[in-house]
Amino acid sequence: MNPANTREEVLEAAANLRWEVGPDLHDSLMEALYTDAARISDRVLSRDDARPAFDLDRTIDRLVTSRWLGFPIMMLLMAVVLWVTITGANVPSSLLSSLFLETLHPALKQAAASAGLAWWLDGLLIDGMFLAMAWVVSVMLPPMAIFFPLFTLLEDFGYLPRVAFNLDRWFKKAGAHGKQALTMAMGYGCNAAGVVATRVIDSPRERLIATLTNNFSLCNGRWPTQILIATIFIGSLAPPVLAGLVSAGAVMAVVLLGVGCTFLVSWGLSRTLLRGEASAFSLELPPYRPPRILQTIYTSLIDRTLIVLWRAVVFSVPAGAAIWLVSNIHVGGTSLAEHLIQGMDPFGLLIGLNGVILLAYIIAIPANEIVIPTVLMLTVVSAGLSGVGEGAGVMFEFDSASATLGVLEAGGWTLLTGINLMLFSLLHNPCSTTLYTIWKETGSVKWTAASALLPIAMGIVVCFCVAQAFRWLGG
Amino acid sequence: MQPTHPPGACEVCPAHHPANLKRLGVNMDRYDFVVALAGNPNTGKSTLFNSLTGLRQHTGNWPGKTVTRAEGGFAYQGSHYKLVDLPGTYSLLSTSSDEEIARDFILFGQPDVTVIVVDATRLERNLNLVCQVLEITGRAVVCLNLMDEAERHRLTVDQRSLARELGVPVVPAAARQGRGVPLLIDMIHQVATGSFVCKPHRIQSEPPALKRAVSLLVEKLGAAFPDLPNARWVALRLLEGDARIEEAVRSGELAGLVGATEGAGTAAPAERAG
C-alpha cells in the first residue's frame, strides 16, 4: 500500500466526517473542554468562604483604574519616579564626573605625555574616546540605576497592565492596539527594548503603529538632555525655591507632549497608510504582588542598567573619535566642525535651533546621551571662546548649570533655543540601535526609513512653528 | 500544602540535595532530554525558567512578556536537560502567533517532558489549557504555581486528587520564593527517565456525534501512522480543518513524530546533537 495514498485517505475521511459533525465542532469541543475543566476544578478546589471584610487588591484596582483618579494617579506616579530620578542622580553623577574628568583624565594625559604619545593619537584616544565614554558613564549610570529599578518595581507590583487598561480607550480611538500602552511604557527605558516588546501585539498593522510611535517615549538617553536644559533655561525663570519643581514640570510637559504625539500619529497612521479597525483583545489584570525589592534592584541593575550602559559606551567611543576629528581636521584654516556648523546655521536658526545643535544630532546618531556634551564642545569651538573648556574636540561638562548657561549664551542661545532643543530631543530620529532593531523586527527598509523620517519631519515643523510664534510674540 | 512524608524520607530523597541541580545557563552542548514550559500567560513560567537555568529572562507582573522562545539548560542526577520557555497562551486551538509557537513546539518539537505551569488561584481556566496539552502529549508534569497567592486568597487545592484526575504528577510550588522547585525537578526527571508513567486525562464530555467521528478518523490515522500517540488530538484538528496539521499529514511529517512522544523512557537517546 502506498503510504502517500493512505495519508490522502485520512484527509478525505476527515473532509467527509466534517459534514457529519456539523459546523459547531469548535464550540462543542470548547464546551467539552470547559466542562471537563470545571468538573476537575470543582472536585479539587475548596475555598474558605469567610471572605475578609476588606479586599486590598480590589480596593487598589478601584482606585488606579477609576475614571476620575486613574489618570491623575498615573501622572503622579510618573512625576514621582522622575523627581526621585532627577534629584537622586545629582550627587553620584557629579562624583563620577569629578572622578573621570578631574582625576582620571589629567592622569591619563600625564601618562601619555611621559610615554611620548603623538599629540593627535593622544587627542583622539584620551580627549575623544575616553571623554565620550566618561561622559556617558557619569551622566547615564546614576539616573538609569534609579529609574530602571523604580520602573521594574512598579512592573513587578502589577501596575503596568492597569496603565494599559486606563489608556485602552484612547488607543482604541486612535485605531491602535491597547497593548501599545505596555510597549510605550517600555520605551521610557529604551526605545530598542520597546520596539522588541511590540511582539506582544498580534496584528501586523497595529504592531507597525506601535513600532513607528515608540520613539515618542523619551528614552533614558534623552532624559539627561531634557533635565539639564529644563534646569538652566526654564527652571531659572522661576524663583529658586520653585526652580526644581518648575523644571520637573517642564520635563513632564515634554513627556505628555510625547504621549500626545503617540496618539496623534497612531490616529493618523490608522486613517491613512495603516488603515484598519482596532482589534479586540483580552488583557488579564494580574493580582498585585508584593515586589521583591532586593531581587528587583539586583536584576534590573545587572540586566537592564549594565546592558544598556555597555551598549551606550560601545557607541559613544567612535562618536567621541568623530567629534575630536571634526574639530581638529582643518580645511582652509578653519576646522571641519566650523565649516559644517556655518553651513547648517541658517537652517538651524530658521527653526529656532542652530548649526551646533544640528551637527551634534548628526554626530550623536549612535547614542542620544552624548548630545549635550557634543553641543557644549562645538559651541566653544564655533563661538571662539577662549579660556573655557579643555580645548578643541574635548568633551567636557561644567560643574554648575550657570557656567553651562554662560557658554551657551555666548554661543547665541536664547530661551527659544532651549525650548526648541527640548522639543527636538523628543521629536527626532531614533538612535541607530533602535533603527537597527526596527529593521530587524519589521524586515523592511521602507518602514525603518519611515520611522526615522516621520519624527524628524515633525520635529522640524514643530520647531519652526514655535520659533515663528516666539519671534512674533517678540520673545 | 506540603505532602506528608514518613520521617527520614527527606534525607534519602534525591530532591533533598540542592547540589544535585546544576544550572547550566545557555551551555547546552549536549543534552539528554528536552523539557518545554507551557502555561497560561503570567503564571510564572519565566520565573521558573530562571530558577532552573540560572539565566535571567525578563520577568514582570504582566501577561505577554515572553515574546520569543527562550532556551536554557540544567543538569540533574547526571542527565542534561534543555529547557524551552514558551510564550504563555490560554488555548492551543485558535491561530494567534504565540499559540502557534507553543503548539508547534509541543507537537513537532517533541519535548520529552512538558511542564504545564498552572496558576493555582485561577485553576479552572488554567485547566482548560492543561486538558488541551494532555491531548497532545501524555508526558507532562503540572506545576501548581503561585501557591503563596492561593493561600493568601484562602484557596486549598487537593493536589493528590488533581494528579489522579489528570493522570500526571502535580507539584505545588511558589517559584518566586523557590518553593517546590526541587520536587518539580525530581518529577521532571522521573517522567523523562520513565520511572513515572503518565496516564493522561482525555476529554470526556464531547457530544456523541463528535465521539463517533473521532473514533472513525483515529482508525484511519492508525492505518497511515501506526503508533501515533496523539491520534485523537490530530483527528480533532483535522475535523476542524487545521491547515498546518493537514499539511503535516499530507507530507508525512507526522510520521516522524511517532515513537517520539510515545511510551515513557523509550524515546530518550543517551545523547542528541545540540
Image (cartoon, rainbow, N blue to C red):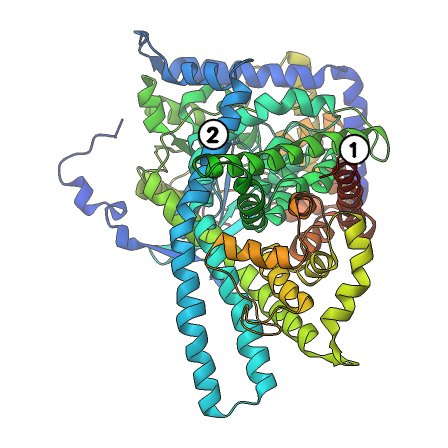
Q: Residue furthest bottom?
A: A116
User: Where does residue A154 sit, x and y in percent of width and height?
Assistant: 45, 33
Counting from the top left corner in percent of width and height, residue A199 is at: 65, 40
Indicate left or right for B24 with B137 as reference: left
Q: Which amino acid, by three-letter code, is at mark 2?
A: Leu
**Alpha carbon distance from label 2 to label 1:** 58 Å
Report the disc number at residue A77: 2
Quickly name the residue at label 1.
A11
In the picture as drawn, the residue positioned furthest to the left comes out as B7
Q: Name the side, left or right, on which A221 lies relative to B240.
A: left
Q: Residue furthest front?
A: A474
Which residue type carries mark 1?
Leu
The disc label shown at residue A287, or none? none
At horizontal 39% and vertical 23% (from top left) the residue drawn is B162
Q: Earlier in the sequence, mark 2 or mark 1?
A: 1
> How busy is the neighbourhood of tag 1: few (under 14 within 10 Å), some, or many (20 plus)?
many
Mark 1 lies on a secondary structure that is helix
The answer to whether residue A403 of the structure is visible from this angle is yes
Element assignment for label 2? helix
